[in-house]
Image: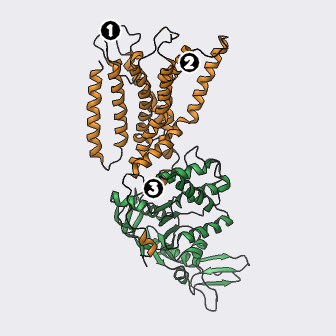
Chain colours: A green, B orange
Amino acid sequence: MSTAAAVIELRRRFGRTQALDGATFEIGAGVTGLLGPNGAGKTTLLRILATVAAPDSGAVSVFGRDPSAAAQRVEIRRRLGYLPQDPGFQRGFSVFEFIDYVAILKEMTDRQQRHAEVRRVIDAVDLTSVSGKRVRALSGGMRRRVALASSLLGEPQFLVLDEPTAGLDPEQRLRFRELVSHAGEGRAVLLSTHQTEDVAALCQDVVVLDQGRVLFQGTPSDLSAVAAGRVWLADERVSGAELVWRTGEGRFRHLGLPPSGADLVDPTLEDGYLLLVGRFAEEAAA
Amino acid sequence: MSAVLEAHTAERDTSGATWLVVLQLGWREGRRMVLSPVLLLVFGFFMLMAGVETVVEASLSLPSRASAYDFIFFVFALYAGLLFYISCHLVSSSARRAKAEDQLASLPLSPRARAAGMCAGVLLGPGLLTLAAVGALSTLGNDVVLTDGKSPVSGAELMQIVLIVIGGGLFAAMVATWLRFPGSLPLGFVTLVFGTVWMLNAERDPINTWPWFAPYLSSYAWSDAVWSLQGSHTWHAVYLAGLCGLAFCAVMFREREGRVRWLFVSAGVLAATAAAGALQL
C-alpha cells in the first residue's frame, strides 16, 4: 500500500482521559474508513492528522513530512482538506463569502481562479441555489455541506473528514458518496463515521479504533469476515448470543457463538465491527 | 506512493505569496470591520441626530461648511476610535466565538499571518475610511469658523485622528488575540476609556504631563487646561503611531514560533515610541 499518512505509537491524554493509547496505522491512496464507538479517540486522531493538535508522544507523518516542524506543517496543510466534527461559521458570511474566505486562507491569490474554484465546490455539494444566503440561516445539514465544500477547495491530496454524513438526508448521503469516491481516486481520504454502510460502500481500507488503540486494520471484507460463522437467524430470541435484535422480517438476528444447526447467514461489515468492539470491551472489563 | 500522490508531494514555491494573501485577507477583514452591523447602527444614530438637530433648529437648508466640518470632526475625533474598537474586536474574535478555530488552524496561512491580515484590515478598512473623512475635513478648508469659535485643527492633528482610529482597531486586535475569553471586549473597552479619562483628568499642574501621553487628539487633550505646558502636535502624532506599532507587535508576539525576531522589533518600536513621547512635550 502506498503511504499517504502514518501514525506510530500515538498517545494523547486529556486530564484523566487517555484519548490515544499507542495507536499505530498507515493510510494509503483511496478511502479509509475510521470506525469506533463514542470516546474511542477518533476525533483526537483526526485533529492530530489535520495538524490542528499535537500528540503527547509518538510519530506522525503525512506525505513523508513531520507536522511538528513548522515548515513541513505548512507543506502538509497545503495538501490537506479537513472537515471537523462541529464546524463553526463566523456570523454574517454568506455561503459564497465563507468559502471564498477559506479559499484566501488556502493561499488562492488569483481572484478569478479562486471564485471559479469556490463556485465549483459549491456546485459539488449542491448548494448553488443558496450560495448568496447567510450560512447561519441554513439548516444543519446544509451547513455541514458548506463545511464539506470548504474542505474540498483546491482538490486536496489528503482529505480528513470527521463524521461528514451526520445530519445529511439519504439523497445527500448518496451524493456525498459520489463526491468522496471521486476524491479518493489517486488521493487519500480518511473518513471517520458511525455509518458502517458508508464504510462498506466507499472504503478500500478500514481502521477500527477503541479506547485509543487500533483494534483492526484491513479491508471491509476482512472486517466482515471477523463475524464469519457467528451470525445466524432464528424465529425466537436465543440466550447466550452477544447481541440479538429483531429484524424487519420479524426474525431474530444473533451475533456470537451459534448453537448447532443454527441458520447461519453472511455477516456484514457492521456484524464484524460489533463483534470486534464488543469482544474488546469484554476483555477490557475483565 | 501512487503517481498522483507523488506529484503532489513536490515542494511548492510560494515565497512572496504570503504578503499578497495577507493583503487580500486584510481587504476582506477591513470591509467586515467597516460594515459591522454595530457600527452601521451607531453611525445611523449619529446621522439621525444630526438630521433631528437640523429640523429642530428649523434650518431646513443644506448644512453649512462649518456644521459639516463640526459633524465629521466630532464623529471621527471623539467616537470613531471607540466604535472601531468594538467592530474590530468582533471581527478579530469571530473565529473563536463561532468555534471555527479548528477549521482555520488546518489551513496553510499561519496564525501569525492571519493576525497580520487582521491588522492590515484595520488599516485598509477603518484606517482608509478615516483618512477619507480627514480628507473631507481638509477639503472643507481651514477658513471655516466652527460653532464653538475654535479654528480647524492642523494637518498633524488631522493625522492624529487617523492614528487614533487605527490605534483603537489594533488595540482591539491585541485584546482579542491575547484575552481569548468571553467578556474581553467590554474589559478592553473599559480599560481604554477609563485609562484615557484618567490620563486626561490627571491633576493639571505645570509638571504633570500625563494628558500628553493619552491616546487622544492633542489639541483636545489640553484645550481647557489651565496649565501652560506646550508640546508638539507632530511629535504627538508620531507617538500615537508608535502606540499603534506596539499594539501590532503585541498581536504578532502571540505566536510562539519566531518570537525572538518580534522581541527585537518590539524593543525598537518601544524605544521609538518612548523617544516620540519625550519629544512631544
Q: Looking at the image, is mark 2 or mark 1 nearer the viewer?
A: 2
Q: Position of residue B208 (x, y in %)?
A: 30, 14
Q: Is residue A79 above or below residue B49?
A: below
Query: Would you say residue A248 is visible in this rendering?
Result: yes
**Mark 1 → mark 3, Cα distance in angstroms:** 56 Å
Q: Position of residue B237 (x, y in %)?
A: 36, 24
Give whichever of B176, B145 is nearer the camera.
B145
Q: Is residue A79 above or below residue B155?
A: below
Direction from residue A206 to residue A258 in the image, left or right: right
Task: Identify which amino acid the numbered label 3 is placed on.
Answer: Leu
Sequence order check: which comes first, mark 2 or mark 1?
2
Q: Residue at x 59, y 69 (%)?
A: A195
**SS for callout 2:** helix
Q: Which residue is mark 3?
A: B107
Q: Residue at x 65, y 51 (%)?
A: A138
Check the residue under mark 2 and report the chain it is in. B
Sequence order check: which comes first, mark 3 or mark 2?
2
Image quadrant holding the C terminus of chain B, namely top left
Q: Quadrant of residue B251?
A: top left
Asked if the residue at tag 3 contacts the one at tag 1, i.e. Cβ–Cβ closer than 8 Å, the answer is no
**Mark 3 → mark 2, Cα distance in angstroms:** 46 Å
Image quadrant holding the N terminus of chain B, namely bottom left
Q: Pick out the residue farthest to the right.
A: A249
**Mark 2 → mark 1, Cα distance in angstroms:** 31 Å
Check the residue under mark 1 and report the chain it is in. B
Mark 2: few/some/many CA within 10 Å (<14, 14-19, 20+): some
Q: Which residue is mark 1?
A: B228
Task: Identify which amino acid the numbered label 2 is placed on.
Answer: Ala
